[in-house]
Amino acid sequence: MDIKTIKKEVKKQINSAETLKDLDDIFKKYLGKKGKITQILRSLKDLSEKQKKETGKLANEIKKELESAVKEKKYVFQSADWLASKFQDIFDISVPSKKPLVGHLHPITLVRRKVEEIFQQMGFSVVEGPEVETEWYNFDALNIPKDHPARDAWDTLWLKPESQKLLLRTHTSPVQIRYMEKNQPPLRIIVPGRAFRHEATDASHDVQFYQLEGLMVGKDISVANFKAIAKEFFQRFFNKEIKVRLRPGYFPFTEPSFEIDVQCVICGGKGCSTCKQTGWLELWPGGMVHPNVLKAVGYNPKFWQGFAFGMGLDRLVMMKYKINDIRLFYGGDLRFLQQF
Ligand code: DAH
């Protein structure tokens, strides 16, 4: 057999050897008294001077390789055997290892991203604003004057020293003002973010929660546009045909103001415990931007108009995943979080 073929054969066999005995057998087969390589080395004398040199060199190389490969493998096998015999009562080395714990997105983040995607498809930009606000942006510019009763209702968390009049924003609406101050209409934005209120917690209230503010300003933006956008959004979000209705509401920064109700996504409008048997879910407050708000940012209300809304993002998440307590979102309980 050609010496090069032998070399390949030897390598293959060493690699697939599984026991010490296999290795001994390979060693004997090639380097034993009657081994293939031994025989080649013995017959060298019958070859020409040139052949002798080439074949001899190659045969010796294989011999060395084989010897060291066998030595190395023997060592590996012996150590494994030794380990196994030593520890067989302690651990089972054939048990698959534990999977590392991999994190995942919080349900609010999952829903926020989905909502952003839907609004972006409808031409809205995603904008952010500060969580620590001034009185002006949180109240005054939004047409909530100093003595207005609505201010009390916000139950604001004021920062110290109180003389600075800094607060944790009570809603995402101040970002409307910040954005309009720096940009000219026509514009379409949404503002997902955290808001804070100084109130007792229960299943549907927490001191912090997420809102989704929206604002669209242009030349001929009407209530009809608002209703169409709301319907389109909910249909894409819940992936089915959904009816919406407008009821009158009140907010200082919109005129007229509405509550947009969505046909209950749980019972389809028949009445169930989620919609308190009404068939409708109160999900989305909003209205047409008040002329005073437009004036506060330097827009001419005779020329520009638009709508704004401020949806509770947590409520949307609670609807989607049928979660009945808002405090679960912020409690950090892994038994809850790992379900998403
Ligand atoms: N900021 C209001 C709140 O926190 C929600 C809201 C209502 C926002 C009407 C709006 C709006 O932009 O037009 O309750």
Image: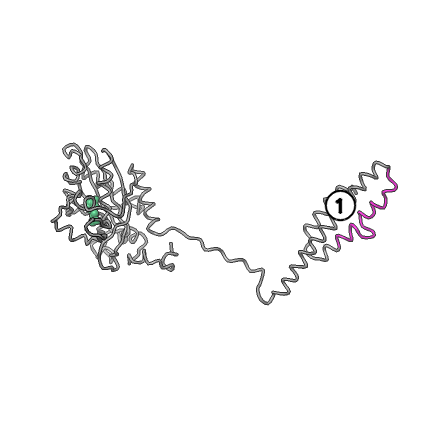
Can see residue 219?
yes
**Percent x, y of residue 119:** 29, 41
Tell me, yes or no, whether the highlighted magenta stretch contains residue 45. yes
Question: Percent position (x, y) of residue 223?
Answer: 18, 39
Work out whether residue 248 or residue 333 is closer to the camera in this orientation and state it: 333
Q: Examine the rendering and report whether any part of residue 285 can be seen.
A: no
Q: Magenta region, mostly helix, strand or loop?
A: helix
Q: Is residue 114 above or below residue 334?
A: above
What residue span does the magenta drawing correspond to? 25-48
Along the line of sight, the residue nearer the viewer: 148 or 11 = 148
Q: Residue furthest bottom?
A: 89
The quadrant of the image that shows the N terminus is: top right
Residue position for label 1: 62
Q: How is the image coloured?
A: one colour
Give SS at disc 1: helix
User: Label 1 CB, ligand 1: below 8 Å?
Assistant: no
Residue 172: give x, y in percent of width and height: 24, 46
Residue closest to the far left: 147
Identify which amino acid the numbered label 1 is placed on: Ile
